[in-house]
Every structure is written in C-alpha cells, then in structure tokens.
Amino acid sequence: MAKPGKVGLNRVISAAKYSYQGLRAQWQHEAAFRQEACLFLISLPFALWLGDSGLERAVLIFSVGVVLIVETLNSSVEAIVDRISHEHHELSGRAKDLGSAAVMLALILAAVVWLVILFG
C-alpha cells in the first residue's frame, strides 16, 4: 500500500525544496564538497574549451559531476552513522571508510577520463 502524501506538482515542488535543503546543508557543513564544487566550476570552462566534440565535453563535465554526487552520498552515510552513535564501532568505521573510498574512486575516474581525452 502506498504511503499517503503529496501528489502531482505539489510532490515535485516538495522534492525540489528538500533537494535544495540538502545541497545547502552539504555546502554549509562539508568542506570537501565545497572544494569539489570549486573544482567542478573551474573544470567546466576547460571541459567546454578542451573537448573536441559535444560528447567529449559532456564526458569531461560528467566525470567531475560524478564526484559531487558521490561526495553527497558519502556525506549522507556519515550523517547516518554519526546520528546512530559517536562511539567507535567496526561497522561504523567500515561504512565511513567505504564512503571515502567511493569518493576516491570517483576522483580517480575523473582524472583518468581527463587524461584519456586530453592525451589519448
């Protein structure tokens, strides 16, 4: 049975509001996100200039955008873990480490994409 709630345009408006609140919280509380967002903004004009085709420009932009998405998911994992307890627990540490590893992999992927397109 579906959970009762907003439907149609009201649901879309509410979802947009919650997304904005999440991005605002991410910007306010996560220095890594701010750094990666600056990297995205700096890389954007370079991607448009250096890409030889629309596809290359899109892939360059997308690869750095993925870093922002993964960082946001990592921050959500960290927030949930911290909400549960600040005490050290092996599984809590593993969850945070896995989120961090995902961000690192996204950064490596972006670097590889840029290197392949620029020098390949």
Image (cartoon, rainbow, N blue to C red):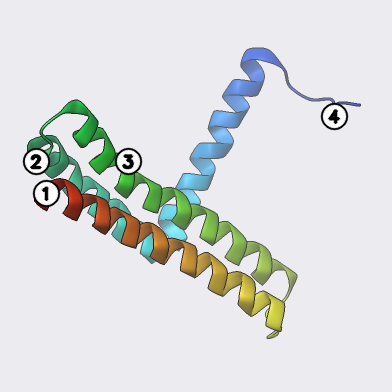
The reply to whether callout 4 and callout 3 are in contact (CB within 8 Å) is: no
- The residue labelled by disc 4 is 3
Amino acid marked by disc 1: Leu
Amino acid marked by disc 3: Phe
Label 4, label 3: how many angstroms apart (C-alpha)?
34 Å
Label 4, label 2: how many angstroms apart (C-alpha)?
48 Å
Q: Which of 116 and 111 is in front in this view?
A: 116
Give the label on residue 50, or none. Answer: 2
Q: Which residue is drawn at 58% across and 57% down?
A: 76
Instruction: Please tell me whether mark 4 or mark 2 is closer to you in this view.
Output: 2
Label 1, label 4: how many angstroms apart (C-alpha)?
49 Å
Q: Looking at the picture, how far across and down is residue 65, in whole percent?
A: 35, 45
The answer to which of marks 3 and 2 sits earlier in the sequence is 2
Horizontal side of residue 101 vs 40, given as left or right = right
Instruction: Please tell me whether mark 2 or mark 1 is closer to you in this view.
Output: 1
Q: Which of 70 and 82 is in front in this view?
A: 70
